[in-house]
Image (spheres, coloured by chain):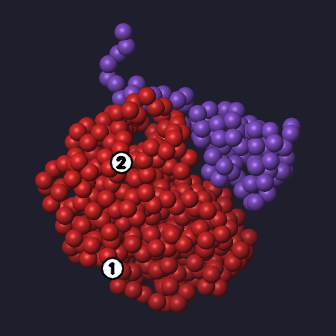
Amino acid sequence: MKNKADVVIIGGGVSGCSLAYMLANKGIDVVVAEKNYLSSGATGGCGAGIRQQWSTKENTELAIKSVKIFKSLSAKLGQDIELRQGGYLIAVHDAKEMKQAEKNVNMQHSLGLKVDILDSNDINDVVPVLDVKGMAAIGATFCPTDGHANPFKTTFAYVNAARKNGAEIYTHTKVTDIKTIKGKISAVKTDKGIIKTNTVVNAAGVWSKKIAEMVDIKIPNVPFRKEIMATERLKPMFEAMVISFKDGIYFSQQEEGQIVGGIPIPGEKKGYKTLPTFSFIQHMSKTLTRYVPQLKHINMLRHWTGFYDVTPDARPILGEVKELKGFIQCNGFSGHGFMLSPIVSQILSDFIADSKTSKILESLNVNRFKGKKIDHEMYVVG
Amino acid sequence: MKKSAIVCRCEDITEEEVIKTIEEGYTDLEELRRKLRIGMGPCQGRVCIPMVIKILEKKTGKKISKISIPTSRPPITPVPLGTMASDKDEK
């Protein structure tokens, strides 16, 4: 193990690994410390979706830029990340939801994104298997350039490319403490040894809160257990990701043919619990077969849990904290870390390597929660 | 065992593919699983994981006890969505 580095990233999920790749590309001496295996946290459990349809302008802008990078990522990293742009169909259930959808689509159009508002009769043109009556939809919005990619393969592709560029990525290496001298970071202590550094990136997902506590910094993130399931493999049936904010459901058919999707369980509680629940299986099966009745004959194979690292406004926390020089946050993605990782790693690597800041980076700093009005992202599912 | 022998019957993965992937640097059972999808099919690894562990042991020299075994996920055996969506008891 190295005993010093320019930057130590804590967390080997897609956020930490993409940032390691970007920094190594810029000639920065970077180390990743992952307590378990690569993508063992939220990245490995996620629903793989990549969406640009958001309710806040900032998120939409970030997501549009992210998709642009995703499109060239397989070629850039030299490995297939299985990106498929089959679109996202967002179901609209009532007049109130339609009003919000129209407002959002106008904002999305102003940013140059192609999104259509569909009549209930048009829904089956996009996703033929949906039972429009069963799902009680009066319409939908559809963005054809949304889609999904393989989160494991994306993370591994970033890691392999980062290693080629000189990054060191240590798995099964747990950070036990962060040392400071005179208000500056001096070293990261792990169970495998000490690494001297002046810059630490906290990309530890739901454990980011605990990492921040090591240096007496409070971040407002709260862990939520989320559940998700996969069916057996099927022939290609539909390309779009289908989501509903009212029902909380999201599902898509993946590259290999399985349908993967999730829904929040009633009475969801915060905390670090990882055990799956039977109420999810029932709630998901009921809702999914209401949306696509013919799936009642299809087997559910596996059901697992993952975490959302949720912030008060459901937007990430990025950038350096005021109280401690060199302590950089890259967490609080609230369920959207995978889809935002390409643009987030670009913004943060510009800041760390070139001291370049931006309006968006400033707006996502943790100090936004101090006595200010919060612009909450409303488009969250799962 | 022949190199072309199928190790994972759910996902059609051969011994050769497992060895090649280990040589590419995926020496963690969990990472190997995510790269190749072994153990993610209907049997959830009951057939392949013991074999993959043996191959991993041979290639890396690490003992089985040092390798953690992947979690089996509910519902353990495949169950139709319609069965789980139903509240009615069968008569």
Give the vertical position of A61 relative to A120 (above or below). below
| Image location (x, y in percent) of residue B74 | 51, 34
The residue that label 1 is drawn on is: A363
Q: Amino acid at mark 2?
A: Val
User: What colour has chain B?
Assistant: purple
Tell me if residue A270 can be seen.
no
Q: Quadrant of the N terminus of chain A?
A: bottom right
User: Marks 1/2: CA distance?
Assistant: 37 Å
Q: Amino acid at mark 1?
A: Ser
User: In the image shown, does A198 or A50 lie closer to the viewer?
Assistant: A50
User: In the image shown, does A154 or A366 lie closer to the viewer?
Assistant: A154
Q: Tell me which residue sits at (28%, 71%) in the image.
A: A108
Give the vertical position of B45 relative to A273 (above or below). above
User: In the image shown, does A259 or B48 lie closer to the viewer?
Assistant: A259
Tell me if residue A280 can be seen.
yes
| Image location (x, y in percent) of residue A256 | 56, 47
Chain letter corresponding to the colour red: A
The residue that label 2 is drawn on is: A127
Residue A116 left/right relative to A43: left
Q: Tell me which residue sits at (51%, 64%) in the image.
A: A204
Question: Mark 1 packing: few (<14 Cα in 10 Å), some, or many (20+)?
Answer: some
Chain designation of label 2: A
Q: Are marks 1 and 2 on the same chain?
A: yes
User: Which mark, by number, is residue B57?
Assistant: none
| Image location (x, y in percent) of residue B71 | 59, 40
